[in-house]
Amino acid sequence: MLERSAAAFAIAGGTVLLAIAAITGVNVLLYLADLLAPGRLGIVRGYEDLVRLFVSAAVPMLFPYCQLRRGHVAVDLLAEHLPPPVRLGLERTGVALTAAIALFLAFWLAQGLLESRADGRIAGVLGWPEWPFFLPGLLSLLLWAAIAADQLRGGRR
């Protein structure tokens, strides 16, 4: 279940990032066309809002899959020379800290979501409410913590 969820989140996040890249390409082409024929096409309305909201939702969706594959950056300069039990202890400590940090971030992101919703915060140009864009990140952080906790319990991942 955790593997399928992490993969689904990563695919969804990657798809959103590809869409952002496509929108950016269209926006650049429209900008260049506007330089050649001013006032004819313009640029994508609300581009900055769109990119900010979508990136903030998509990027955290990649974290659970990265944790699942143990793809995070690890510094092994000294650890590679330590005895295996010490290396295992360091790894388990790192995974425990990762789970704790993901939960800490989830707590504060939930607070931000509630505050944004209560304030009625909207994106400046698009006029979209911002709080729904917190949800993918919040769910991603919780999934990330769950995967790290599963790894601590000796999950196969």
Image: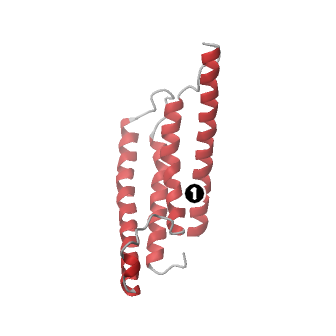
**Which corner quadrant of the image does residue 142 belong to?**
bottom left
Q: Would you say residue 92 is visible in this rendering? A: no
- As helix, strand or loop, the secondary structure at mark 1 comes to helix
Quadrant that contains the N terminus: bottom right
Residue at 64% across / 16% down in the picture?
36
Q: Which residue is more in the foreground, 47 or 119? A: 47
Quadrant that contains the C terminus: bottom right
Q: Is residue 126 left or right of residue 120?
A: right
**Which corner quadrant of the image does residue 26 belong to?**
top right
Where is residue 115 drawn, in percent x and y? 35, 43
Where is residue 120 drawn, in percent x and y? 40, 35
Residue at 53% across / 49% down in the picture?
58
Q: Which residue is more in the foreground, 125 or 18? A: 18
Disc 1 designates what residue? 9
Where is residue 111 drawn, in percent x and y? 35, 49
Where is residue 23 drawn, in percent x and y? 61, 35
Residue at 49% across / 33% down in the picture?
49
Q: Amino acid at mark 1?
A: Phe
Q: Circle 1: is it few (<14), some (14-19), or many (20+) Cα within 10 Å? A: many
Q: Would you say residue 22 is visible in this rendering? A: yes
Q: Which residue is more in the foreground, 131 or 25? A: 25
Q: Give the mark count.
A: 1
Residue at 44% across / 42% down in the picture?
131
